[in-house]
Amino acid sequence: MEFASLAVLSGLPEDDPHHAVGLPIYAAAAYAFDGLEDGAHRFATNQGYTYTRIQNPTVAALEARVAALEGALGAVALASGQAASFAALLALVRAGDEIVASPGLFGGTVGLLNQVLGLFDVRVQFVPPEVDAVRAVLGERTRAVFVEVLGNPSLELPDLEGLAELCETSGVALVVDNTFGAVGALARPLEHGAHVVTHSLTKWASGHGSILGGAVLARETALWQRYPQFAQRDAQGRVPWEEFGPRCFLERVRQLGLSLGGMVLSPFNAYLLFQGLETVQLRVERASQTALQVARWLGEQPQVAWVRYPGLPEDPAHPRALRYLRGGFGSILTFGLRGGIPAVSRFMAHLRILQAPNVGDARTLAVHPWTTTHSRISEPARRAAGVGPEMVRLSVGLESPADLQAMLAEALVKLEQVAYED
């Protein structure tokens, strides 16, 4: 079945007693047992519902739809994208292990790696997401290579297949944050060899900037047999790989992230995300077309020093974008203003486009990463992430391209006036 059909047909419960066309919202904290044996069986096997912190029918429907759209073995939905990244990595590492990560990650992810995982005695090495650079730092305790499908906001695009081959040979999981891949509408890293995918469903799955959500997905792989936490007996005397097979990683994510960690997605949010996915492909295609027009137009403006957008033939990511992206080149672009922060400050003061630290919204959003999303990491780390003081990130929405260009032009002309007055 093609993506457009999966977006509207997958995940709907087939056993709904009322045959509802839409997804029911199960607003329940717990689920009754049919006697002692039934309760014991549910807790022992993780089959059936016990408590919403662990699993909920509405959330399960969302997980099934997200997995179908990504071509995954399965999915675990969590409270946010940050929760998804945390739970995925926590399932892969133990004290003394190492993670190799791209320096161009979202600022919140960099903070998670540096400030939180360090508390668990996990070491992180930041290197460019290129095969040779990653190969040079892989060690015996490396358990994950973490990259974004498109750097946020650097828009660098790693060689997914090259990294996947290296990781497979080395016995290391390739984890790809596919948030900018729009739940498979734009990119499907699992098809290119990634072992694990994470998502902030807050973005394109929601599509309206109104709710939070995240997901961890995995493909079928025998790699988990090489991880002690899956191949050896746990505290309950079970060997996860023997009991769950390739799903053992997802079961550990569910245990650590939900059952023990409590990073639970509300069934009400799951319902809205489930609905949002029905139109994700249409929104991504429309926004991608507009983003390409806006990127071309910005490149012609004298106040703009540079433009980054994977759809531009001259962009460094363009060759890989042709290989790994589908249905367009995405709705995120960045550009640099001549004059640095003073120019950016004046530009933002006169910009009628909404300014907010989010992406994937139906409305176009602008943000200055240097002073917002990446402001809590050091200046060298910001520059290593591809963030400079002159950069503006634009998440293009569903407005008319002509209207967006007019709003950008209104703010850009103010920079000309400053230059003239000087």
Image: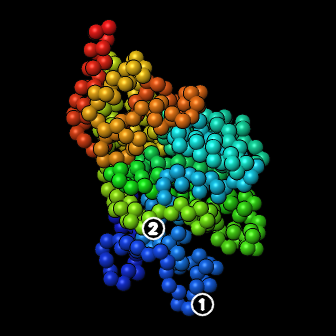
Quarter placement of the N terminus: bottom left
Disc 1, SS: helix
Tell me if mark 2 has few (under 14), some (14-19) or many (20+) residues whose alpha carbon lies within 10 angstroms of its own: many
Could you tell me the amino acid type at mark 1? Leu
In which quarter of the view is residue 322 placed? top left
x, y percent for residue 168: 67, 51
Quarter placement of the C terminus: top left
Q: Looking at the image, which is closer to me, 66 or 269?
A: 269
Proximity of marks 2 and 1: CB atoms separated by less than 8 Å: no
Could you tell me the amino acid type at mark 2? Val
Residue 79, compared with residue 140, is above or below; it is below
Q: CA distance from mark 2 to mark 1?
A: 26 Å
Residue 59, compared with residue 414, is above or below; it is below
Residue 83 marker: none
Of callouts 2 and 1, which one flags the residue occurring earlier in the amino acid sequence? Answer: 1
Q: Looking at the image, which is closer to me, 273 or 28?
A: 28
Mark yes or no: residue 83 visible.
Answer: yes
x, y percent for residue 205: 39, 55
Tell me: 138 left or right of 366.
right
Mark yes or no: residue 72 visible.
Answer: no
The residue at the far bottom in this view is 35
Residue at position x 73%, y 73% from top?
236
Say which residue label 2 marks: 59
Disc 2, SS: helix
Residue at position x 76%, y 43% from top?
139
Residue at position x 41%, y 41% from top?
357
Say which residue label 1 marks: 36
x, y percent for residue 390: 43, 24
Q: Looking at the image, which is closer to me, 210 or 303?
A: 210
The residue at the far top in this view is 422
